[in-house]
């Protein structure tokens, strides 16, 4: 099982993930895409990554606004798996014109 990060480790990770914030036992990013199809494209790309990593974010889609919530449920909070996935999500969003900084 993945180990929970300390509050200091989460804060340090968020220093490298400028668009992310901590919300309880998760890290969260919301992005507004150019269109609904582009939002779905982002979700589909993240879904492929999540399946490959066997680590899945919670995803909320509201028209063209997508919120990604990363938490390791089995560990009860944020682990290195979530930080890695957040970075991969940033890469997808960057390809779609959403800056990560």
Image: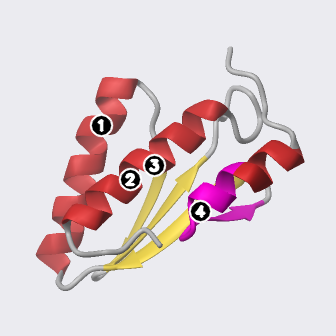
Q: Which mark sits nearer the N-terminus, 4 or 2?
A: 4
**Label 2 crowding class (10 Å Cα cut-off): few <14, some 14-19, many 20+?**
many
Which quadrant would residue 51 be assigned to in this image? top left
Q: Which mark is residue 89?
A: 2
Residue position marked by numbered label 3 in the rendering: 87
Residue at x-position 57% and y-position 32%: 81
Determine the secondary structure under disc 3: helix
Residue position marked by numbered label 4 in the rendering: 28
Give 66 or 18, whichever is nearer the viewer.
18
Q: Nearer the viewer, mark 1 or mark 3?
A: 3
Determine the secondary structure under disc 1: helix
Cα–Cα span, label 4 and label 2: 11 Å
Q: Which mark sits nearer the N-terminus, 1 or 3?
A: 1
Q: Which mark sits nearer the N-terminus, 2 or 1?
A: 1
Determine the secondary structure under disc 4: strand
- State the extent of the magenta-drawn residues as a range: 13-23
Cα–Cα span, label 2 and label 1: 9 Å
Q: Position of 44 compared to 99: left or right?
A: left
Cα–Cα span, label 1 and label 3: 11 Å
Q: Is residue 49 above or below residue 52?
A: below
Residue at x-position 68% and y-position 14%: 1
**Label 4 crowding class (10 Å Cα cut-off): few <14, some 14-19, many 20+?**
many
Cα–Cα span, label 1 and label 4: 17 Å
Cα–Cα span, label 4 and label 3: 12 Å
Residue position marked by numbered label 1 in the rendering: 49
Q: Which mark sits nearer the N-terminus, 1 or 4?
A: 4
Cα–Cα span, label 3 and label 2: 5 Å
């Amino acid at each position: 099982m993945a180990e929970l990060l300390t509050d200091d480790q989460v804060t340090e990770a968020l220093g490298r993930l400028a668009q992310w914030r901590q919300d309880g036992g998760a890290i969260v990013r919301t992005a507004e895409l150019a269109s609904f199809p582009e939002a779905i494209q982002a979700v589909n790309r993240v879904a492929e990554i999540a399946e490959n990593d066997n680590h899945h974010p919670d995803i909320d889609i509201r028209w063209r606004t997508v919120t990604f919530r990363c938490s390791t449920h089995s560990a009860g909070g944020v682990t290195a798996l979530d930080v890695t996935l957040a970075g991969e999500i940033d890469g997808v969003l960057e390809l779609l014109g959403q800056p990560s900084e």
